[in-house]
Image: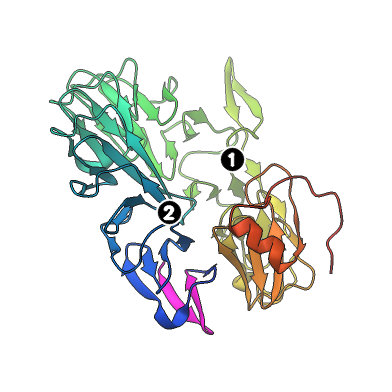
Amino acid sequence: MGYAIVDGEVRFGRMLVDRAEAASFVPLGWGWGKDKACVYSYGCKVEGAKPKSFVALDAAFGRDAERVFGGAKALDADVATFRTLGGGYGVDKRHGYYGELRLGWLIACWTLETVDAATFATRAYGWAVDGTHAYCAGEAVPDADPETLNPLTRRLASDGKRVFAGRRVIEGADAATFRALDEHFGVDAKRAYFGDVITNVIEVADRDTFRSLGDDFAEDHQYVYWHDNVLAGVAPQTMRPLSERFACTDTQVLYFYSGIHGTRRISGELHGTKPIVLEGADPTTFRDAGDLFGADAKRAWHHSTRVGLRGEASRFESIGVRLARDDVAVYYENEVVPGAKPATFAIVAPAGVARDGKRWYRYNAYGEYPMIQKSSADEARAILDGEGEDEGEYEGEYDD
C-alpha cells in the first residue's frame, strides 16, 4: 500500500487523502507523504508538521525542525536527541516511545514513561529491554528479566525461568523445554499452550501430536482448536484456515469472531465451541475479501451474514471499514448503498467519511449502530477536521 495520483487526486491505497495537492505531492516512504502545505501519515493529515523540514524516520516516526511525530500525532519528545531503534520503538534523552499500525492505515503511538533511555534497546519480534524492564509491543512485562529475555515470536518469549505471552506469564509452562509453534501456540515437554491477551493451557490437547495450522488454529490427533478452544464438529486433518476469521473443511466454510459462538457438549464434561457455518458457501472457491467480508464464486458475506450482491462475486472486495464493492454496487456491511458508484467510491482518510465523485457520505466507522447516509460537503469536512460526529444511531432510511 502506498501513495498514487489517480484522476488528479492523491490516494493512499484505496483511500482518498483529503485536500492533498496532487501537483506538489511527494511520497516519503513508510506511509509518509507531503505536499507544499501539509504532511500525511498513512493518508491522515499530520497536524502542525512543517513539510519543508519534515523527514520520515521509519513507519512509526517522523520529525520536522521543531517536533517529533508518531503517526499523525505530535509527541512530547526532544527533537535533538530523538532516534529510532526499529521494531516500532524510538527514544530520546528522557523516554522511550512505541508506535504500531492499527486498522491497516492508522499509526497509534504512546510514550513509555518507565523506560531508562540510557539502556533502552530493541530485541527481535518487537520486544525491547532496558536495565530494569522488558517490553512487548510497547507494554512493560513486569515479571520478565531483561538480561535473559529471549523473544520467540511477536507474542511469546522466555527469560529462562518463565514463559510469557505478551505481558503475562504463562502459568505452568516449563521454560527449559518450551518452544513456540507459531505466533501464539507453543508446547513444552508435557502440555500445549495458547498465549495472547489471555494465556491458557490447552488441557485436553495431546502434546505429542499437537501442531499449529496457522491463523490461530491448531490440531492434534483428536481435536481441532481455535485459540485455546476445542472446536465441536470439526475433525482433525479436515481444517484449512484461510485467515483469522475464515476456515474451510471439505464441505463447509466456517466463520470465527470472539464472543458470538455457542458451545456444544463433545463428551463427558468436555464442551466445544461451535463454529459459525456460512450456509451455502463453497469451500473450494471461498476467499477472505478483507475486513470481515468473504466471498466464493457466486456469493458474499459480511460478519457471517449474506450480502445482497448486485454484481460479480469475483469482483467483490473490501474498500475499508464496513464498506465493500463489486463491479455494480457499493455495500455497507451486507446492504447496498443506493446510487453509489463503485468505480469512484472511496473512503476519505481518516475514515468516517466517503466520497463518490462529488457526492459525500458520512458513515459509522467503528460504533455499535450501523449507519450510512448522504452528507453535505461542509458536514463531511467538519468530521474530517474533528469537529463533527461520525458515530451514533441512525434511524432513518437511505437517502437515494
User: Which residue lies at the image location 78% right of the left edge and 73% below the top edge?
Assistant: 339
Magenta span: predominant SS is strand
Residue carrying label 1: 257
Residue carrying label 2: 72
Q: Are marks 1 and 2 in contact (CB under 8 Å)?
A: no
- Residue 390: mark: none
Q: What is the basis of the colouring in this image?
A: rainbow
Query: In the image, 129: left or right of 254?
Result: left
Query: In the image, 395: left or right of 283?
Result: right
Image quadrant containing the N terminus? bottom left
Amino acid on which the number 1 mark rests in the picture: Tyr
In this view, the residue farthest toward the front is 66
SS class, disc 1: loop
Q: Upstream in the sequence, badge 1 or badge 2?
A: 2
Query: Is residue 281 in view?
Result: no
Chain part drawn in magenta: 1-12
Mark in the foreground, 1 or 2: 2
Q: Point out residue 135 in the picture as x, y percentages from the top left corner.
A: 27, 31
> How packed is label 1: few (under 14 Cα within 10 Å), some, or many (20 or more)?
some
Query: In the image, 20: left or right of 57?
Result: right
Residue 3 among magenta residues: yes
- Quarter-of-image position of residue 46: bottom left
